[in-house]
Amino acid sequence: MMEFFNEYLVVLIALLVCVIMSIIRVIRGPTAPDRVVGVDTINTIVIVGMVVFGAAYQEVIYIDVAIVYALLSFISTLFIAKYLEGGEF
Amino acid sequence: MIFEIIIYIFLGIGVFFNVLAGVGLLRFPDVYTRLHAGTKCTTFGSIFIIGSVILIGLKTWWEKDLNGSVLAIHSAFALIAILLTNPVGAHAIARAAHRSGVMPAQAVVDELQDKTTKKSTGKKPKAKTALKEEGGEQ
């Protein structure tokens, strides 16, 4: 399955451009929720990039890492949102 | 042949919407519109990219051996995880942004303000009693 290798590298470079734009938003964000939105977008794009990487090299272990990363990023996002809200945990 | 064309079309749609999410995250003026761009476009694009990976796994399973089915099923689980966790996280961020005092750009009236303050400060039973008293007086 080496004929999909180059196409998936192109997809990964495009996703890298998205991550760079989100990092610019994280650096320039005026308020704290802007930075949280940028970090959430970076998390989703990194999950998609891990799945694409696992499909490019035919390795299933990257996709398992992507599943665990998705659940952990969801928990961290909820925790940061609860912290910004200022309520009790 | 037509299978590969479908896979490439899915990859193109997914990459287009992910780049659109990045551009919207840079260009929009507000927290809520940035959240709108960064969450919905990313979810829609990841559906198509992971869908293409699922199709490649099914093709490998159809042609060669059973390793492609493992790839397809695990990619489907990753897609289910993204679909379940992404809107919930976006809703939590939006509610936290509104309660921490971030107003939308060019906003004049905030009609959600009274509801959230009543809920957060515990004035809701007082409002209920006030409504009951008004009903009794009438």
Image (cartoon, rainbow, N blue to C red):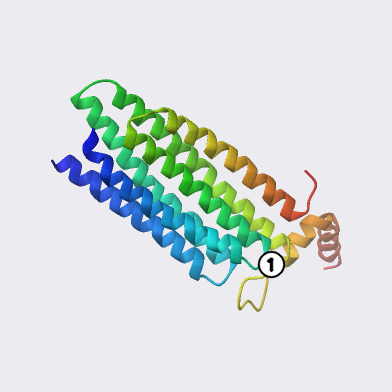
Residue A36, horizontal then vertical, whole percent: 62, 55
Q: Quadrant of residue A32?
A: bottom right
Give the residue drawn at x 43%, y 53%: A16
Is B21 or A26 nearer to us in this picture?
A26
Disc 1 marks a residue whose amino acid type is Val
Q: Quadrant of residue B96?
A: bottom right
Is B59 or A30 nearer to us in this picture?
A30
Give the residue drawn at x 50%, y 67%: B26
Is A85 or A73 nearer to us in this picture?
A73
Give the residue drawn at x 21%, y 38%: A3
Q: Chain of mark 1?
A: B
- Disc 1 packing (10 Å; few <14; some 14–19; many ≥20): some
- Quarter that holds the N terminus of chain B: top left
The residue at which mark 1 appears reads as B102
Above or below, A44 against B100 in this view is above
Residue A7, horizontal then vertical, whole percent: 27, 46
Secondary-structure class at tag 1: loop
- Quarter that holds the C terminus of chain B: bottom right
Q: How many marks?
A: 1
Position of B10 compared to B128: left or right? left
Give the residue drawn at x 37%, y 29%: A59
Residue A18, horizontal then vertical, whole percent: 44, 57
Position of B103 compared to A67: left or right? right
Above or below, B80 against A32 in this view is above
Which residue reaches farthest left? B1
Which residue reaches farthest top? B66
Residue B114, horizontal then vertical, whole percent: 75, 66
Q: Quadrant of residue B99?
A: bottom right
